[in-house]
Image: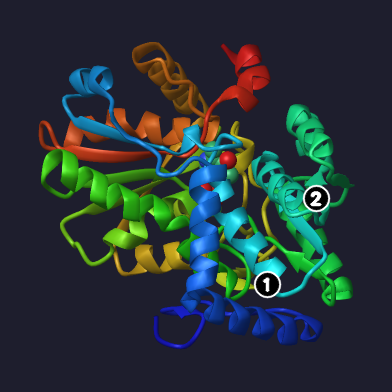
């Protein structure tokens, strides 16, 4: 990173003036917190005793045999609340508490980040408002009920596509007017500085554990790291600790929806252009007039028309490769892992699984692959039931 808050030309902080001061405050407080032993100790206590870390790195022997690869699954699906999101919400809520904030707000798409946020707000006794697109409220009604059970207030957003992008816009709007007592927990490596750095640091526990575990089990580093990319937090969390090991190849799998050629996909890095969304310069799905396109994916957690700026940087410097798989391929991947390994993945994760079949055709036989199993599939039963 050169200029503060930038990854090459990507990142920065493109926000209304009222937010400049609080982002600076957040940046300063986070810089202090990350160096504080007390902060790190408290976070590591909750990550282990509340959330269930470390997660296993599991050798998926059945699909390994079929694919002629050695596939290890980083089991973030086994965490409390069922996905990697809790790593980040725990980090940010402990920071919010240090900053003396009394109210938490967040945006959510699939509802996973909303649930992870409502969970930590309940844990620390903070008021919690979650913005969620009306469309997602319908698609993910179980998660809405979960958030409400956890004591959070779910605010429906009826603007635009009524999905994640609009929920995030509303949450930023709320923050502008209530910054004094309110902490905004962003759910991915997107948004203005310092969020992309902060969320990446909190999710880097995935890659740090993986590095220790894979070396312990196989006495070597992996050939490939594979993860699905929505905003990009589980992928960046896995990739980042391996950045300097140039032989470890990174593959980020986006959602091609009904196909890249159609209007209905969320493959931001594969098909987007340079732009600014939610306070950050990165790659954005936009039309020829620069209007943000509506993203689509069968996985609600992937249908975001932006992506974290560090991924745009990794793509630009060719440190990572980004690919996309369709809704149908993801559903196949979903069935494949369920039937062959006895593990039902989230539909988001199923995109990464689906890509393994393509990887097996081009990678050397028995290549060592670590796949981030970002979440479990219980939340998607309704959708999958209707589709297969
Ligand atoms: C939210 C979510 C994602 C996508 O978010 P990233 O920030 O790209 O990681 C992927 N998998 C699961 C299970 C999720 O809940």
Give the residue displayed 33% in from the left and 55% down from the top.
Answer: 208
Q: Nearer the viewer, residue 31 or 362?
A: 31
Count every numbered label the image shows and give the total: 2
- Indicate whether 153 appears above or below 236: above
Residue 373 x %, y %: 42, 36
Is residue 44 or residue 306 the one in the foreground? 44
Q: Nearer the viewer, residue 293 or 129?
A: 129
Is 73 displayed left or right of 385 in the figure? left
First in residue order: circle 2 vs circle 1:
1
For the question of whether residue 123 can be seen, the reply is yes
SS category of the residue bearing label 2 = strand
In front of the other: 80 or 129 = 80
User: Please, is residue 180 above or below residue 301 in the view?
Assistant: below
Q: Residues within 10 Å of mark 1 (few under 14, many from 20)?
A: few
Q: Are marks 2 and 1 in contact (CB under 8 Å)?
A: no
Q: Quadrant of the C terminus?
A: top right
Secondary element under disc 1, as helix, strand or loop, is helix
Name the residue tied to disc 1: 98
- Left or right of 89: which side holds 164? right
**Badge 2 density bin: few <14, some 14–19, many ≥20, Cα 10 Å:** many
The quadrant the N terminus occupies is bottom left
Residue 198: x percent and y percent? 53, 68
Q: Which residue is mark 2?
A: 130
Residue 199: % across, % down: 54, 62
Image point (45%, 16%), residue name: 335
* Callout in the foreground (2, 1): 1
Q: Residue at x 58, y 47 (%)?
A: 86
The residue at label 1 has a CB less than 8 Å from ligand 1: no
Mark 2 to mark 1: distance in Å?
21 Å
């Amino acid at each position: 990173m050169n200029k503060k808050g930038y990854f090459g030309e990507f990142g920065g902080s493109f926000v209304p003036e009222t937010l400049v001061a609080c982002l600076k405050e957040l940046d300063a407080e986070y810089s202090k917190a990350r160096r504080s032993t007390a902060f790190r100790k408290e976070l590591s206590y909750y990550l282990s005793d509340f959330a269930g870390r470390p997660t296993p790195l599991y050798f998926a022997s059945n699909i390994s045999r079929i694919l002629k690869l050695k596939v290890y699954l980083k089991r973030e699906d086994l965490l409390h609340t069922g996905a990697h999101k809790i790593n980040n919400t725990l980090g940010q809520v402990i920071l919010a508490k240090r900053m003396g904030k009394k109210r938490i707000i967040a945006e959510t798409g699939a509802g996973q980040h909303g649930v992870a946020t409502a969970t930590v707000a309940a844990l620390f006794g903070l008021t919690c408002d979650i913005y969620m697109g009306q469309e997602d409220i319908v698609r993910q009604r179980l998660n809405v009920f979960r958030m409400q059970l956890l004591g959070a207030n779910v605010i429906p957003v009826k603007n635009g596509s009524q999905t994640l992008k609009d929920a995030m816009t509303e949450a930023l709007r709320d923050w502008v007017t209530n910054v004094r007592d309110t902490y905004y927990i962003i759910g991915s490596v997107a948004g203005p500085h310092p969020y992309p750095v902060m969320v990446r640091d909190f999710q880097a526990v995935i890659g740090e554990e993986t590095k220790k575990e894979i070396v312990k089990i196989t006495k070597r580093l992996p050939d490939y790291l594979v993860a699905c990319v929505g905003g990009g937090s589980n992928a960046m969390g896995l990739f980042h600790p391996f950045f300097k090991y140039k032989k470890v190849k990174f593959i980020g799998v986006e959602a091609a929806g009904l196909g890249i050629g159609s209007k209905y996909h969320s493959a931001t890095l594969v098909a987007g252009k340079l732009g600014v969304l939610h306070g950050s310069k990165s790659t954005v799905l936009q039309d020829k007039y620069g209007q943000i396109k509506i993203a689509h994916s069968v996985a609600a957690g992937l249908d975001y028309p932006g992506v974290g700026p560090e991924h745009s940087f990794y793509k630009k410097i060719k440190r990572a490769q980004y690919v996309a798989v369709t809704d149908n391929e993801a559903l196949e991947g979903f069935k494949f892992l369920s039937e062959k390994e006895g593990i039902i993945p989230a539909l988001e994760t199923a995109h990464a699984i689906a890509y393994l079949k393509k990887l097996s055709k081009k990678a050397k036989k028995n290549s060592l692959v670590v796949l981030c199993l970002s979440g479990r599939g219980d939340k998607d039963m309704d959708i999958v039931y209707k589709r297969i």
